[in-house]
Amino acid sequence: MRLRISHTTTYLYEPPATGVIQILRVTPGSHDGQYVAEWQIDVSTDSRLDVHQDAFGNVTHVLTHGPLADLTINTSKFTVHELRDFIREKFWGGREESKIMVYVTSFGYRHGVPPDSDLVFDVRFLPNPNYIPRFKKLTGRHPSVARYIRSFPQTLEFIERISQLLIYLLPHYIREGKSYLTIAFGCTGGHHRSVMIADQIRKNLSQAGFHTKVTHRDLAKPV
């Protein structure tokens, strides 16, 4: 699909200008993150348009013309990123939070790291409820287990720091074209710490306005 986006600037001179010099910095460049498929500059008058390159490698144009009463400069282009942004705005709406689906999952390292994870956080630094007999057969979704894990200051600080990090990162992932992100939290067996953390992070991201879904991959597996 090809999309052409045009930008037009019009200058009206009253009285007519005796001469015009305009420096145009409107030429995009191709790089690793963007490919310019088409580009052109149209000027309403028969003006001189000289191409230059600044010290940073950016392409600029110097437009010169004699007496005139008005001048219209039209630039048109489409790039991969602009096409993506246009489609997002058209079909997803204006809020960035609505443009990405966040999957939060818990897992046990003894069963392997989920291969589709984008971000992986190891929560084995937290005290393990599995060593407490009354918690061994419960999971991180049980209020008593969750309360025990939350009782440690490092748990609360970790949840706060990771939540703020993700809320900062997600808009940047959106701008780079990501429509979904999988965040995995791992503990030893995937029954206690990672489960509680995943549930709380999902809740925090949801409250921040992001679409979220939580899964607990290893909850039914033996500890």
Image (tube, helix red, strand yellow):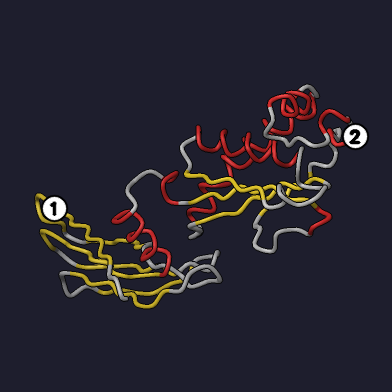
Q: Residues within 10 Å of mark 2 (few under 14, many from 20)?
A: few
- For marks 1 and 2, give the CA distance: 81 Å
Query: Seen in the image, is 205 located left or right of residue 45?
Result: right
Q: Label 1's element?
A: strand
| The quadrant where residue 194 appears | top right
Q: Position of residue 38 (x, y in %)?
A: 35, 77
* 136 relative to 174, above or below: above
Query: Seen in the image, is 173 located left or right of residue 148?
Result: left
Residue annotated with mark 2: 131
Amino acid on which disc 2 is placed: Tyr
Q: Position of residue 123 (x, y in %)?
A: 79, 41
* 15 relative to 33, above or below: above
Q: Nearer the viewer, residue 121 or 76?
A: 121
Q: Residues within 10 Å of mark 1 (few under 14, many from 20)?
A: few
Query: Seen in the image, is 118 located left or right of residue 222?
Result: left
Q: Position of residue 29 (x, y in %)?
A: 46, 70
| The quadrant where residue 44 appears | bottom left
CB atoms at circles 1 and 2 under 8 Å apart? no
Residue drawn 28% across the image and 56% down it: 90
Q: Position of residue 96 (x, y in %)?
A: 42, 46
Q: Nearer the viewer, residue 199 or 79?
A: 199
Amino acid on which disc 1 is placed: Tyr
Q: Nearer the viewer, residue 26 or 97?
A: 97
Residue annotated with mark 1: 13
Q: Label 2's element?
A: helix
Residue drawn 48% across the image and 73% down it: 30
Mark nearer the viewer, 1 or 2:
2
Q: Nearer the viewer, residue 5 or 23?
A: 5
Residue drawn 34% across the image and 67% down it: 62
* 16 relative to 129, above or below: below
